[in-house]
Image (cartoon, rainbow, N blue to C red):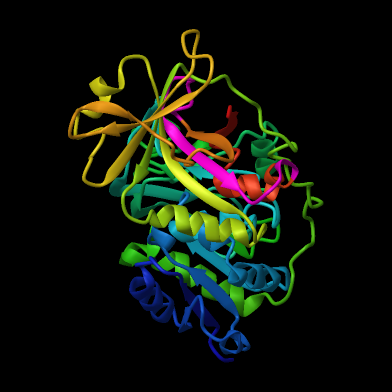
């Protein structure tokens, strides 16, 4: 019997390909490197796919969002439907969640969101954790081992979460929670001493209903400790062929996210909109992703800060604003200013100059991410042109600008 052939996928910004290729080979499988823009014919004899960690597209928009909408992922989704194995570790897991392959195959049902412990963002985590299989040994492609596994994590957005109140129970019922964080003795706990990123139910990894797609946040490919993970993968592939559907729950209807509209908020009396002096690469990449849905769309991405005090008090701090790299605009609207007035901050004179900029012309909406979603917190402002309101509010398009399970999107007034 020939060894399973695994394509290790490389999107721009991934950085774990070498470890992933090595781990696949050490498990007795054939590893094939495949760049996102390679000829698809190279995949004709591939038995499975491994999407490694890193920062695909520099995490522009959010981790995994852009790569998940690459045409290659649609192809990999079709392969998964035929029973082929698809494994995503760290950024690969984020891509699988954003593509909808996890948890149910289609639809954005959850998020791998910012690490949040006891209500506070903890930023990027680089440490060692313990995980243990929490499903049946034969439930998914990589769960065929017992005990605890000591693995590194390295992520800023690794918290499995959802705003679908029924999702967790569905995952439990269908035995799709494949791996959970535990202590060295194997005790599963949800507190921060064991669950590093605040993931709901201490989830470290999830499989799809068929068990052939797995998303895992830790890195078994980076340590010899992870060998049982890849050995289980090889065994599964040698003993199972084709779609696995026996005993599974019916496919659920994907959660609707945008509901066809954006709630509006009142203008803050004093608002800052901060642009970049040079090209904003994140803005360009997010626009390119959105144009796959609406080709005529034009996008501007700005930092948004609602102020309680005077703009000068905020802008004079280099940690808040760098005049060598950024341009600040002030919008005032209130009892004393019945018509919105836009000015440009002059960093040399420390004053506001009258502006005729068309920067804010278009439909504007604001994204805030957990745990920072209070009314007065900063966020990202998107200004859209070249598209009508009905198309702007489609779920597919709104999900590019914010994951509805970890972010809020609201309409800003003109």
Farthest residue, direction top = 335
Q: Residue furthest right?
A: 250
The quarter of the displayed image where residue 323 is located: top left
Q: Nearer the viewer, residue 220 or 97?
A: 97
Residue pictured at 34% horizontal, 62% vertical: 225
Q: Residue at left 34%, top 72%?
A: 19
Residue occupying image coordinates x 58% and y 45%: 384
Could you say where residue 251 lies in the image, as x and y percent from the top left? Answer: 79, 52
Q: Is residue 95 visible?
A: no
Question: Nearest the camera: 369 or 394?
Answer: 394
| Residue 110: % across, % down | 60, 43
- Image position of 299 with respect to 201: above or below: below
Residue range highlighted in magenta: 371-390
Q: Residue 61 versus residue 155: which sits nearer the camera?
A: 61
Residue 162 lies in the magenta stretch: no
Can the viewer see residue 3?
A: yes
């Amino acid at each position: 019997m020939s060894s399973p052939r695994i394509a290790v996928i490389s999107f721009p910004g991934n950085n774990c390909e070498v470890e992933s290729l090595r781990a696949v080979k050490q498990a007795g499988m054939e590893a094939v490197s495949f760049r996102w823009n390679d000829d698809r014919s190279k995949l004709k004899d591939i038995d499975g796919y491994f999407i490694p960690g890193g920062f695909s597209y520099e995490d522009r928009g959010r981790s995994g969002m852009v790569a998940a909408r690459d045409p290659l992922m649609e192809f990999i989704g079709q392969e998964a439907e035929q029973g082929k194995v698809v494994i995503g570790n760290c950024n690969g897991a984020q891509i699988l969640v954003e593509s909808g392959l996890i948890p149910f195959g289609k639809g954005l049902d959850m998020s791998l969101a910012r690490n949040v412990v006891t209500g506070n963002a903890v930023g990027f985590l680089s440490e060692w954790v313990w995980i243990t299989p929490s499903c049946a040994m034969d439930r998914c492609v990589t769960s065929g081992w017992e005990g605890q596994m000591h693995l590194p994590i390295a992520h800023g957005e690794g918290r499995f979460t959802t705003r679908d109140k029924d999702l967790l129970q569905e995952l439990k019922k269908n035995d799709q929670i494949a791996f959970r964080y535990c202590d060295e003795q194997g005790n599963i706990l949800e507190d921060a001493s064991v669950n590093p990123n605040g993931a709901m139910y201490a989830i470290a990894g999830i499989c799809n209903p068929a068990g052939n797609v797995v998303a895992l946040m830790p890195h078994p490919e980076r340590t010899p400790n992870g060998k049982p993970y890849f050995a289980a993968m090889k065994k599964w592939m040698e003993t199972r062929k084709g779609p696995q559907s026996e005993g599974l729950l019916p496919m659920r209807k994907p959660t609707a996210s945008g509901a066809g509209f954006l709630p509006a908020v009142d203008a803050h009396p004093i608002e800052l909109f901060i642009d970049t002096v040079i090209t904003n690469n994140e803005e360009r990449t997010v626009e390119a992703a959105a144009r796959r849905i609406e080709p005529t769309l034009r996008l501007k991405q700005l930092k948004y800060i609602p102020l309680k005090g005077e703009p000068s008090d905020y802008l004079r701090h280099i940690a808040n604003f760098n005049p060598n790299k950024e341009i600040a605009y002030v919008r005032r609207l209130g009892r004393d200013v019945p018509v919105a007035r836009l000015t440009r901050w002059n960093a040399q004179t420390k004053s506001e100059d009258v502006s005729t900029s068309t920067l804010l012309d278009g439909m504007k909406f604001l994204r805030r991410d957990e745990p920072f979603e209070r009314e007065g917190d900063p966020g990202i402002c998107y200004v859209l042109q070249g598209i009508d309101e009905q198309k702007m509010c489609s779920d597919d398009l709104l999900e590019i600008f914010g994951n509805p399970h970890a972010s809020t999107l609201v309409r800003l007034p003109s």
